[in-house]
């Protein structure tokens, strides 16, 4: 399937499985009359594959070492991308950032690294399912920067177009999205 056909098919899956109308309160605290819940798309076999393939295509030239982001939205994305990147012969390892470090065991904030492995000096992309203001992704950015990583990009599947571009711009971070909310609102 061509990239444009894959993008069109994924759009339809997101529209059918993950986009809705009705008043909701977003993670940012804002009220909205539409929402995206990408979990049904990320956990659908075809949706997961298309998300991973399109994300891989968007990132393959960025010379990345790791992909990850804040739990829960980044976990299925990062895992699927790690698998596709291995299949395509250009492995990008995955991790995720806990919203709050575990209070037992190793008490880690960043999960997925092997014993002795570190993000120190690694090129990292922060990935997110849906981005509104960028606040959640910035929590992940701060955690991986504290771990010594170089954050080279924030990539979201759907940008709600409600402030994230400004948030990341002020932080000096490139920001890209696979889709914009306006595409779904017009459809």
Image (cartoon, helix red, strand yellow):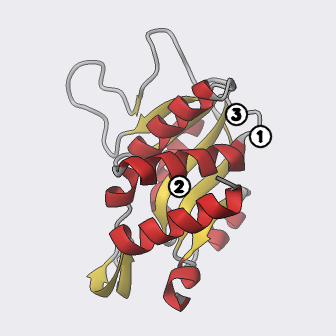
Label 2 vs 1, first from the N-terminus: 1
Q: Nearer the viewer, residue 164 or 129?
A: 129
Q: Quadrant of residue 33?
A: bottom left
Which residue bears the numbered disc 3?
64
Which residue bears the numbered disc 2?
138
Label 1 element class:
loop
Work out whether residue 74 can be spotted. Answer: no
Tell me the distance, in whole angstroms, between the alpha carbons under discs 1 and 3: 6 Å
| Image coords of residue 81 (percent x, y) | 54, 38
Tell me the distance, in whole angstroms, between the alpha carbons under discs 3 and 2: 19 Å
Q: Nearer the viewer, residue 119 or 46?
A: 46
Q: Is 114 rendered above or below residue 43?
A: above
Q: Residues within 10 Å of mark 2 (few under 14, many from 20)?
A: many
Label 2 element class:
helix
In this view, the mark in front (2 or 1): 1
The single residue placed furthest to the left in the displayed view is 104
| Image coords of residue 160 (percent x, y) | 52, 76
Q: Residues within 10 Å of mark 3 (few under 14, many from 20)?
A: many
Label 3 vs 2, first from the N-terminus: 3
Which residue bears the numbered disc 1?
62
């Amino acid at each position: 399937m061509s990239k444009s056909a894959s993008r069109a098919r994924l759009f339809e899956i997101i529209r059918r499985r993950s986009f809705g109308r009705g008043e909701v309160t977003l993670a940012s605290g804002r009220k909205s009359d539409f929402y995206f819940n990408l979990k049904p798309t990320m956990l659908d076999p075809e949706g997961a594959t298309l998300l991973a393939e399109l994300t891989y295509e968007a990132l393959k030239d960025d010379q990345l070492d790791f992909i990850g982001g804040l739990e829960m939205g980044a976990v299925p994305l990062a895992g699927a991308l790690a698998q596709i990147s291995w299949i395509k012969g250009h492995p990008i390892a995955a991790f995720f950032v806990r919203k709050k470090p575990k209070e037992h065991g190793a008490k880690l904030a960043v999960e997925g690294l092997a014993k002795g492995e570190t993000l120190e000096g690694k090129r990292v992309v922060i990935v997110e399912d849906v981005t509104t203001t960028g606040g959640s992704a910035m929590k992940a950015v701060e955690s991986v920067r504290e771990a010594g990583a170089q954050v080279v990009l924030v990539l979201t599947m759907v940008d709600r177009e409600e402030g994230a571009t400004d948030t990341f711009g002020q932080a000096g971070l490139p920001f890209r999205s696979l889709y914009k909310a306006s595409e779904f609102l017009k459809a």
